[in-house]
Image (tube, grey):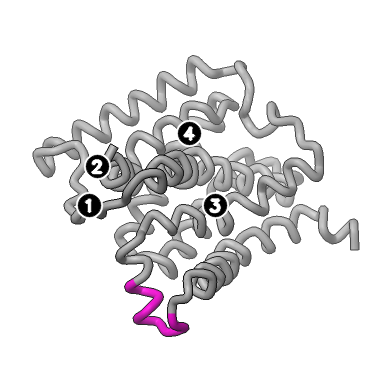
Amino acid sequence: MHRLLYNPKFQVIFTWVWFLVGAIVTILLIVVLTGTPLSRDAAGNLFNEKPYILSIVEIVSVGLVPLIYTFAEKTKLALLGFNSKGIKKSLFYSLMFVLVFSLFGYLKNGTIMSDTRESFSVGFPLNIFFLPLAVFAWGPLEVFFFFWLVEKTDKIFYKANNHYIGLIITTILFIVTHILTTDLFNSLYTGFIFAILGVIYKKSSNIYGPMLAWTLVNGQIWYMIRSLTGNI
């Protein structure tokens, strides 16, 4: 059993399954704990009115398994890109990507961030509590989840001697799973960004640049910041 739990194939499969199942389980727990009726419409209304709660769903479904395995295996964080090696290259290429991405967005929409969703209102202290959770969940944690899977998938195909096999497979699965949770356009759009950040990560062996870049260009984060800081 111990050998199975720490087998890279099992870890990758279980993490992708938990990405979907964990989200459902967490949503059901939130619905029950908030006293919301167990119906699709009632749950939908809850998360439409309080979308900041979804940061908890994101943390549990995305970050929980990779974080548990990282600590359980006592993984050296340097092996996951948390080091000073290549940091200048990582930050330079990541910020160049952010600059080009922002410029393209401005030329296309007349604004850097084109999220037109109506902001929601959250009073103190909930807004202060959920603000760092939202930034962490949809920024650094999502990048950590992605590259943890890249590294684990690389281990499965290590004998293939293809340095990018883990990135290619993870990107494809990232797109497919996001089609199930969002829509085709958003899935391809997000997958394209993560593929570019993945190349930067592979070239620099450093995760800090991609973490910063995704945090800066993720519209979900800016939507949360705009809403959660409205009453500060």
In the rendered image, residue 203, in percent from the top left (x then y), is placed at 54, 27
Q: Which residue is mark 3?
A: 59
**Which residue does the numbered mark 1 point to in the structure image?**
119
Q: Earlier in the sequence, mark 1 or mark 4?
A: 1
The three-letter code of the residue at mark 3 reads: Ile
* Mark 2 → mark 4, Cα distance in angstroms: 25 Å
Quarter holding residue 215 = top left
Q: Viewer-nearest of labels 1 and 3?
A: 1
Between disc 1 and disc 4, the foreground one is 1
Q: Along the polypeptide, which appears first: circle 2 or circle 1?
A: 1
Q: Is residue 31 above or below residue 106?
A: below
Q: Please tell me how many numbered marks the rendered image carries.
A: 4
The part of the chain drawn in magenta is 37-45
Q: Secondary structure at mark 2?
A: loop
Residue hosting label 4: 211
Tell me if residue 207 comes above or below residue 17 in the rendering. above
- As helix, strand or loop, the secondary structure at mark 3 comes to helix
Instruction: Give the image location of residue 70, x and y in percent.
Output: 73, 42
Q: Nearer the viewer, mark 2 or mark 4?
A: 2
Q: Nearer the viewer, residue 179 or 171?
A: 179
- In the rendered structure, are the residues bearing label 4 and label 3 in contact, judged by CB atoms less than 8 Å apart? no
Amino acid type, label 4: Met
Residue at screen point 22% across, 52% down: 119
